[in-house]
Image: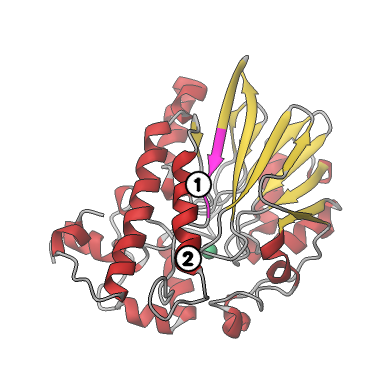
Amino acid sequence: MHATMKAARAHNLLAAFAVSWVSTSNGQEVPTNITKEDLAKDNKLFLRLAGKALKWEEPEEPVKIAGPLHFVGTKGLGSYLFVTSEGNILFNTGMPSSGPMIVDSIKKLGFKPEDTKLLINGHAHSDHAGALAYLKELTGAQVAIMREDVQAIEDGGKDDFHYGWDWKVMGFPPCKVDRILRDGDTVIMGEVRLTAHHTPGHTRGATTWVANIVADGRSLTVAWPDGGGFNPGYRVAKNPSYPGITEDYRRTHHRLEMLKPDIFLGSHCEWFGLEEKKQRAATEGVKAWINSEEYRRFVARQKRAFEDQADREMGVPAPMEKQMTK
Ligand SMILES: [Zn+2]
C-alpha cells in the first residue's frame, strides 16, 4: 500500500483520538489489517493500539510554554501546570500510569508537586483522568469537574455513555470531586484566569478550557478544545449513542469555532505538534507556540470528520477523496 494511503488509513482508524496525527507521524505502527469495526468492537485493542502509536505512556521532557504555563505530560498526552503566586493548577493527568511521570516533570521544572492546589480535566476518559486520584492523594489538591462528567470521574468511568459497560478495560481509579463546574465558570488563581466551556459530545461533560495568561508582558489566550472528536463505535446520528448527541456535537463545534485563541494546545500532543513546537521554542521562545491558524484548521477538520460520520450513518455516500484528505 502506498505510504500516504497507509497513513490515511491509520488516520481513519484512530481519527477520534487524534484527527491530525498523520501529519506528525507516519502511522507505521498501526497494523493495516485491522478495521475500524475491529476497533469499535474491541476496546482493549483500541486502547493498546492508540496508546502505542500515539505514545501515551512514553515520558517526555517537561518545558515552559509561556509565562505561568508549562508542559508536564507524556509524549502523546498533554498535561499542563500553571504556576501562580497563590499555588499551582494541574490540568489533565494522562493515563493511570502517568502519575509518577507528571510528578517527575513538575520536579524537573523546579516546582513542588505539593504546591498544586487545583486539578482540572478535559473529559472523563482514562487517557486524561487516569491519574487524577493518584495526584489528588499525593498533592492534597481540590478537584474541579464539569457537572456532566462528575459521576464518571467519581465512579471511575462506569457512567460513561459509550465505555461504561466495559469500565474494567476503559475505566480509571475513581476520584472524589470537590467543586462542580457549570458552563462558563471561571477559576482564578494568582495571575491566571481559566474559563470552563461545556462542550459535550465526546463525553457528556467534556470541557474546553480557555486560559488568560501574561507572558513577557503580553496578554495571551490559550485554548484546549475538547469534546468535538468521536471514537470508534460512537453513533453520532442514527441510533445515537445517547439521545441528543448529534445536537451536542454540532453546538460544540460551533462553540469551538467562536474561540480565537493565540495559542492552541490539547489533551493529545499530535493535535498541535508538540515536538516541532518545542524545538522551535528553543530559539524562538513564546512566538513558536502562537498558532491561531492551526486552531482554526483543527476545528474545521473535527467538524468535517463529524459531519462525514453523520452522513455515513445516514447512508449518504462519501467520495473516496473526501475521506483521504481529511
Ligand atoms: Zn476521550
Residue lying at the far right in this picture: please name it.
Answer: 140
Residue located at (52% from left, 76% from top): 242
When the figure is inspected, residue 85 is found, relative to residue 309, above or below; the finding is above
When the figure is inspected, residue 308 is found, relative to residue 185, above or below; the finding is below
As helix, strand or loop, the secondary structure at mark 1 comes to helix
Q: Is residue 320 magenta?
A: no
Q: What's the distance in space between the residues labelled 1 and 2, CA to CA? A: 29 Å
The quadrant in which the C terminus is found is bottom left
Residue range corresponding to the magenta coloring: 222-226
Where is residue 247 shown, x and y percent of the image? 47, 63
Foreground pick, 190 / 148? 148
Dividing the picture into quadrants, the one containing residue 106 is top right
Dividing the picture into quadrants, the one containing residue 313 is bottom left
Disc number placed over residue 73 in the picture, else none: none
Residue lying at the far top in this picture: please name it.
Answer: 217
As helix, strand or loop, the secondary structure at mark 2 comes to helix
The quadrant in which the N terminus is found is bottom left
